[in-house]
Amino acid sequence: MSNIDYFKRFIPKSNNEEKPNYEVWSYTRVSSKDQFDRNSSVINQINANREYASKNNYHITEEFGGTYESAKTILRGLNLNA
């Protein structure tokens, strides 16, 4: 063990360490009637998102989305390039 390593244990630990953020948003969509008809429904996606969040200790704070939406339309609404 080097001298520096020995003395590192005496450095006070900071109480200001950032805690991980487990709050997330859930976004669902189907872009076509065909996807909707093939059981890719928004309800199934919501349930899958909730299950994933529960298993991984995430807390969903907002759920949004819809049917027949284009990814380009959504990105345009967020002022992102699609």
Image (cartoon, rainbow, N blue to C red):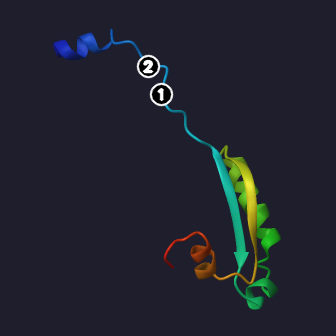
Question: Which residue is label 1 attached to?
Answer: 17
Figure check: 44 above or below 5 = below
Along the horizontal axis of the image, is 13 left or right of 51? left
Q: Quadrant of the N terminus?
A: top left
Q: Amino acid at mark 1?
A: Glu
Q: On the image, which quarter does residue 37 sit in? A: bottom right
Residue at 67% across, 43% down = 57
**Helix, strand, or loop for circle 2?**
loop
Which residue is the site of mark 2?
14
Residue 22 or residue 76, whichever sits in front = 76
* Depicted 76 relative to depicted 45: above or below: below
Mark 2 residue type: Ser
Q: Are marks 1 and 2 in contact (CB under 8 Å)?
A: yes
Q: Residues within 10 Å of mark 1 (few under 14, many from 20)?
A: few
Q: Is residue 35 above or below residue 26?
A: below
Q: Is residue 14 above or below residue 56?
A: above
Mark 2 residue crowding within 10 angstroms, few (<14) / some (14–19) / many (20+): few
Q: Position of residue 80 (x, y in %)?
A: 51, 72
x then y, percent, for residue 51: 74, 55
Residue found 78% across the figure and 72% down from its top: 42
